[in-house]
């Protein structure tokens, strides 16, 4: 039946086409319809490979459906639906079209059954999403988008090379478990790692996401990193290296988040932190850990989207996003405040909110498998994420000192989108069984036992107490207008400087050498001419040809004169 | 909680009230440690007040370290933009010096 064979990205690409040619209410209703229809379609598709053809010597399967890819497929539909509602007020065709294409590419990537298809959608993710950054139409967003694009395309190229090596090593392009042996394994691992914002390769995210448009960031936060998480879960489950990489990812961004002023950049750092939990889960690789990683990805798409939406609402209504400029907005934006707090509670993993039911799985798995130090790091990161995303974001935007801004709540469509996301956060938190039934493994895990709830609540409340205490003591770092150096300093400042120096030196030396050579050449010419001069003084006087011509003219003139005289 | 009344926290009493609720919650949670029998996986969890202490100390260290990081990581807001401007002016300068050299009669193929 052709309906089943229609891959999930097709409706979105058709939606992009529709968005190009329609306007107004028609476009809005069609764009809302796309994720709904596509999700209903996906709901009915059974597991299995639904589309397959031979390409050269390889079997390509662009549409493979199993539990793992379905999980991401569902959440991408939810994310697209919410983000489309959130951006209904936007009248910018570039953004609408690229957002649809971007969501479609994300779906294409998670249902890709072979590495070549994965590569195609991997690159499409980069090329379609960069327009959401450029659509801000500022110089900053342009350069940030450029850096973003270069890094993303680089990741794609490495993936392609890795895929070619993989095909040569194994004679197949099928996308399954790869593991870290052989060049192909490492290359593909690096490609996934770049998109997954591994440490050192993480700055494209903190650089570009805060520069994107209000609605663009909501789309961006949902797809790219989660596709990478999916790819890692598919190809590298149980790779121990991932445990350490993931633990680093959970810890280092929270330090930057505490001192960052741009609140959307704070969220970008906390996005890396959350992805870190997923990476640890994949690295541990037990059924419980993989379940935890996947369900945390599912929840993160929703609550991180909610937080980005609430900060987007603040930016949209006030035109500011720096913590130093904001404060006291709860007075006039009460709905946004409440919705933001729901998102903050979810990301902080408060019991009864969505983060709790998924993050605790990863933590439990780390303990069960004997990763004691990793578990301590995760615990620290949990406290830290509450500190910067759970408290700092709502506190500095909506409370803190009164900035005097009196912006009202955002347009209805934005509020509705946030309300849907908040509703999902709470629903999943209260009734996790719905989420668990979708998971790849059945582990019979129950997050709501007394030990767990008590431990997490204690951790969070005493983190809040620390915040209050530091604030009262005046030890909490104030929000300052600033840029904080991160690893991107290397390629934004150090490398350009070094290259400039090197090339300046090269050019200077080149000039000196050439000056010397010309001087030498001149001298040898003069020497040769002089020598010639002395050899035959009549024939080759040091006269220019001009004087020769003049003398000929003089002779002819005399000849003419003589003819008159005659 | 926040949207019952407008301008809720303009009254310092209300802020105090919230803080007192937080303090009493913390105290309650500490007491619950005795009441609830916990089944633990790791021996550290057995220590009394492990989670509260870890949360509190962890956050204080986090903030203090982050504040210290500011001393060597913080630059002014237009830090990277400034580089761009310096860069282009540097190139201009070089071009102008090139021109002056060519005006003074040096002959270069690429001038």
Image (cartoon, coloured by chain):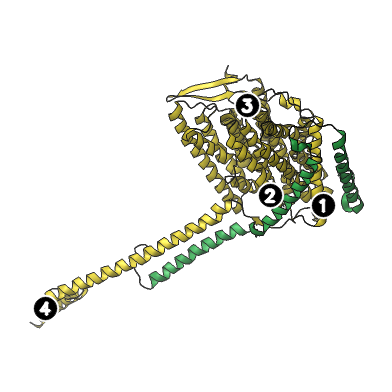
Chain colours: A yellow, B green
Q: Can residue A545 be spotted in the picture?
A: no
The numbered mark, 1 or 3, whose residue comes first in the sequence reads 3
Residue under circle 4? A559
Between disc 1 and disc 3, the foreground one is: 1
Residue under circle 1? A469
* Chain letter behind tag 2: A
Based on the displayed image, in which of its 4 quarters is residue B104 positioned?
Answer: bottom left
Query: How much space separates mark 1 and mark 4, taking CA atoms?
Result: 113 Å
Q: Where does residue A252 sit, x and y in percent of width and height?
A: 65, 46
Residue under circle 2? A255
Query: How much space separates mark 2 and mark 1, taking CA atoms?
Result: 18 Å
Q: Is residue A373 left or right of residue A551?
A: right
Say if A559 sits above or below A41 in the image.
below
Residue under circle 3? A68
The numbered mark, 2 or 3, whose residue comes first in the sequence reads 3
For the C terminus of chain B, give its image quadrant.
bottom left
For the N terminus of chain B, give its image quadrant.
top right
């Amino acid at each position: 039946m052709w309906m089943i064979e229609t891959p999930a990205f097709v409706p979105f690409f058709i939606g992009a086409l529709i968005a190009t040619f329609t306007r107004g209410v028609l476009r809005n209703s069609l764009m809302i319809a796309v994720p709904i229809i596509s999700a209903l379609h996906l709901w009915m598709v059974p597991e299995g490979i639904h589309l397959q053809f031979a390409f050269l010597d390889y079997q390509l399967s662009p549409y493979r459906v199993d539990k793992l890819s379905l999980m991401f497929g569902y959440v991408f539909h939810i994310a697209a639906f919410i983000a489309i509602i959130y951006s209904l007020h936007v009248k910018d065709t570039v953004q609408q079209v690229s957002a649809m294409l971007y969501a479609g590419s994300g779906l294409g990537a998670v249902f890709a059954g072979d590495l070549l298809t994965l590569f195609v959608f991997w690159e499409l993710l980069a090329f379609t999403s960069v327009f959401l950054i450029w659509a801000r139409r500022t110089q900053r967003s342009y350069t940030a988008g450029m850096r973003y694009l270069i890094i993303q395309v680089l990741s794609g190229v490495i993936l392609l090379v890795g895929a070619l090596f993989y095909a040569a090593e194994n004679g197949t392009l099928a996308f399954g478990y790869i593991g870290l042996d052989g060049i192909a394994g490492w290359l593909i691992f690096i490609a996934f790692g770049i998109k997954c914002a591994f440490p050192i390769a993480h700055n494209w995210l903190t650089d570009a996401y805060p520069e994107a448009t209000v609605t663009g960031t909501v789309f961006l936060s949902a797809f790219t990193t989660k596709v990478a998480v999916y790819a890692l879960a598919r190809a590298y489950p149980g790779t121990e290296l991932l445990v350490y990489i993931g633990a680093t990812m959970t810890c280092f961004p929270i330090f930057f988040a505490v001192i960052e002023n741009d609140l959307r950049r704070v969220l970008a750092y906390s996005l890396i932190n959350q992805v870190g939990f997923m990476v640890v889960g994949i690295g541990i690789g037990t059924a419980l850990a993989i379940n935890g990683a996947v369900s945390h990805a599912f929840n993160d798409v929703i609550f991180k989207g909610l937080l980005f939406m609430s900060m987007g609402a603040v930016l949209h209504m006030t035109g500011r996003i720096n913590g130093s400029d904001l404060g006291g907005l709860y007075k006039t934006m009460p709905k946004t405040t409440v919705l933001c707090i729901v998102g903050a509670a979810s990301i902080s993993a408060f019991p009864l909110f969505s983060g709790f039911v998924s993050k605790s799985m990863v933590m439990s798995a780390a303990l069960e498998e004997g990763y004691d130090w990793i578990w301590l790091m995760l615990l620290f990161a949990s406290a830290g994420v509450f500190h910067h995303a759970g408290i700092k974001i709502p506190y500095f935007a909506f409370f803190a000192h009164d900035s005097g801004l009196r912006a009202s709540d955002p347009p209805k469509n934005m509020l509705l989108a946030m309300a849907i996301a908040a509703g999902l956060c709470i629903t999943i938190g209260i009734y996790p069984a719905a989420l668990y039934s979708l998971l790849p493994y059945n582990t019979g895990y129950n997050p709501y036992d007394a030990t767990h709830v008590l431990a997490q609540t204690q951790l969070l409340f005493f983190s809040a107490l620390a915040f209050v205490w530091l604030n009262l003591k005046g030890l909490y770092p104030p929000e300052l207008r600033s840029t904080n150096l991160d690893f991107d300093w290397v390629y934004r400042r150090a490398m350009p400087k070094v290259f400039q120096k090197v090339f300046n030196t090269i050019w200077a030396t080149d000039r000196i050498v050439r000056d010397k050579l010309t001087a030498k050449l001149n001298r040898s010419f003069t020497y040769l001419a002089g020598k010639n001069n002395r050899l035959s003084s009549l024939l080759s006087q040091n006269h220019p040809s001009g004087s020769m011509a003049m003398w000929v003219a003089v002779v002819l003139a005399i000849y003419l004169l003589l003819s008159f005289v005659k | 909680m926040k949207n019952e009344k407008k301008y809720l926290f303009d009254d310092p009493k209300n802020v105090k009230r919230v803080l007192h609720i937080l303090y009493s919650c913390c105290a309650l949670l500490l007491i619950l440690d005795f009441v609830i029998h916990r089944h633990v996986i790791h021996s550290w969890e057995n220590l009394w007040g492990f989670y509260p202490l870890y949360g509190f100390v962890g956050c204080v260290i986090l903030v203090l370290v982050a504040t210290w990081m500011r001393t060597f990581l913080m630059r002014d807001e237009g830090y990277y933009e400034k580089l761009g401007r310096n860069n282009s002016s540097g190139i201009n300068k070089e071009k102008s010096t090139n021109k002056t050299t060519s005006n003074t009669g040096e002959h270069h193929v690429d001038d």
